[in-house]
Amino acid sequence: MIDKIVTLLVLIALGFFCKKIKLISDEGSLILKSIVFNITLPALVFMSIRGASWTPEYLKIPLVVWLSVIFLGIIIYFFSRLLRFNKELTAILVLTGVMGNTTFLGYPIVKTLLGAESLPYGIVYDQSSFLFLFLLWLPFTAYIFLNSDGVSKKVNYSVLDTLIKNPPLIAIIVAIILRNIFLPAFVIDSLNIIAQSTTLLVMLFVGTMLNLDIKKEEIMFVGLILLFKQLCFPAVNYLFSIFLGVSNQITQAILVQASMPVMIVSIIYGGQIGLNASLISKIVTISTVLSPIFLVIISYFI
């Protein structure tokens, strides 16, 4: 397990090096992200879902996700009120403390660490988290921040529009529809080749976005988020998995996904609500940089 994590670190370092010597520009980094999210991730999802053997135990995964988010999210909210954070910091803590990068980083890492047979569990975890985010958690975060200064703020996001523009979700639907339909060998081979490039491209992209420019007064707040997101959240997921009698193989996938760093798109969604996008960007970057350390810790429970 540790050697696989080191391999991922080497790829991240390669991306960082390429960015430093300008082999990959800012525009090139965005192109990498677009290729992964719109092409290679959907191919990976399609092939994984198409070949998965579905059992009733898959239904336990959304329960683990939703119960964990609600349980820890409520604790985070009251903890932030206890520390007398303002409503903006409270909203940022609630959003980033439980929502991880389970698509962009989660898929390739689950596949690398646990094998292709565990990827469908990681996909179900991710999409359960995604739906919960847009149907409940993002509105809840916006509610916390609304009227924080006595002035009503407009939330600029559309749940339906976001769902429609989610390529991995579309890939899941297409894979289910075509599950028992014959596809030519050249189609399957092409999708496999595309899917196999996901890990490399994701890690290169992560390397290009590394930036540790953080103010001294922000360190404690960011550290608090790391404590909740990458230690407490996996622990809560683990406890609910045991409580619900989830199998060991699925629990492993749940643990890996739960330990993912803060989701990159929280920068966008937080900004749409009106939160400090610069601070969220730093949180995402630092949690991503330090995520291998937390993965090593989690690996002892897998």
Image (tube, helix red, strand yellow):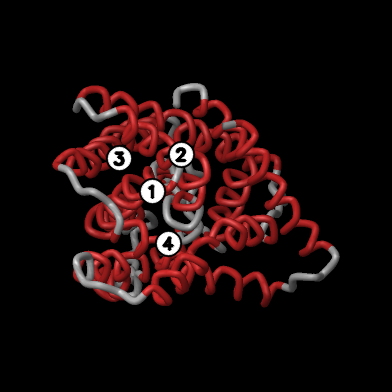
Type of amino acid under label 3:
Val
Disc sitting over residue 119 in the figure: 1
- Among the two numbered marks 4 and 2 on one chain, the one whose residue lies closer to the N terminus: 4
In three-dimensional space, the C-alpha distance between marks 3 and 4, rounded to whole angstroms, equals 26 Å
Number of marks drawn = 4
- Among the two numbered marks 3 and 2 on one chain, the one whose residue lies closer to the N terminus: 3
In three-dimensional space, the C-alpha distance between marks 3 and 2, rounded to whole angstroms, equals 23 Å
Q: Secondary structure at mark 3?
A: helix
- Among the two numbered marks 3 and 4 on one chain, the one whose residue lies closer to the N terminus: 4
Discs 3/2, front: 2
User: Could one spot residue 147 in this view of the protein?
Assistant: no
Q: Which residue is mark 2?
A: 114
Q: What crowding class fits label 3: few (fewer than 14 Cα within 10 Å), some (14-19), or many (20 or more)? A: many
Type of amino acid under label 4:
Leu
Q: Nearer the viewer, residue 123 or 283?
A: 123
Q: Which residue is mark 3?
A: 69
Type of amino acid under label 1:
Leu
Q: Which residue is mark 4?
A: 44
Residue 161 horizontal/vertical position (percent): 29, 76
In three-dimensional space, the C-alpha distance between marks 4 and 2, rounded to whole angstroms, equals 15 Å
> As drawn, which residue projects farthest toward the left?
56
Relative to 218, say whether 233 is above or below. Answer: above
- Among the two numbered marks 1 and 3 on one chain, the one whose residue lies closer to the N terminus: 3
